[in-house]
């Protein structure tokens, strides 16, 4: 497990892994924020390479993952963040932003 430091800002969000009751478990991923227009949510894009046996070359792939963003970790488009898996927060959200790695 990756050690995380508590953010400097405070929040009163009950779904915050630092100031609320949300427990994180499972996978942690590093991805880029591509949309931050929703309230308390963002879309992160995970880019990776996959080998195609038929053509004997690598194909560039991407996945877009909805994640919960708390007020204590403000994110904007272009930021590189670490997201962690948690219990389902809605129909599509099962990840939460836990750390800002690089700002845009």
Image (spheres, rainbow, N blue to C red):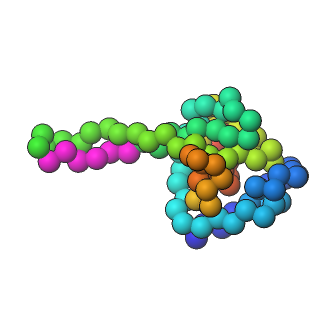
Number of marks in the rendered image = 0
Give me the residue at 81% from left, 60% from top.
20
Dominant SS of magenta comes to strand
Query: What span is colored magenta in the figure?
Result: 48-53
Q: Is residue 59 in the magenta section?
A: no
User: Is residue 31 shown left or right of residue 90?
Assistant: left
Residue 54, quarter of picture: top left
Q: Is residue 86 above or below residue 65?
A: below
Q: Position of residue 41 (x, y in %)?
A: 68, 40
Work out which quarter of the rendered image holds the N terminus and state it: bottom right
- Image coordinates of residue 82 in percent, x first then y, are 60, 52
- Image quarter hosting the C terminus: top right
Splitting the image into 4 quarters, where does residue 88 fall?
A: bottom right
Q: Position of residue 89 (x, y in %)?
A: 66, 53
Q: Is residue 101 visible?
A: no
Q: Is residue 9 left or right of residue 42?
A: right
Q: Residue at x 62, y 60 (%)?
A: 86
**Is residue 28 toward the left or the right of residue 40 in the image?**
left
Residue under the image location 87 percent in, 51 percent down: 11
The residue most toward the bottom is 1
Instruction: Identify which residue is drawn at 19% across, 45% down.
Output: 52
Kindly tell me whether residue 38 is visible in this rendering.
yes
């Amino acid at each position: 497990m990756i050690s995380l430091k508590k953010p400097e800002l405070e929040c009163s969000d009950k779904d915050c892994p630092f100031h609320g009751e949300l427990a994180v478990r499972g996978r942690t991923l590093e991805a880029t924020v591509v949309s931050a227009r929703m309230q308390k949510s963002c879309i992160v894009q995970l880019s990776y390479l996959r080998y195609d046996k038929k053509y004997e070359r690598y194909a560039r792939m991407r996945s877009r993952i909805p994640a919960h963003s708390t007020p204590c970790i403000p994110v904007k488009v272009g930021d590189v963040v670490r997201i962690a898996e948690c219990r389902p927060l809605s129909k599509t959200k099962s990840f939460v932003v836990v750390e800002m790695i690089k700002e845009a």
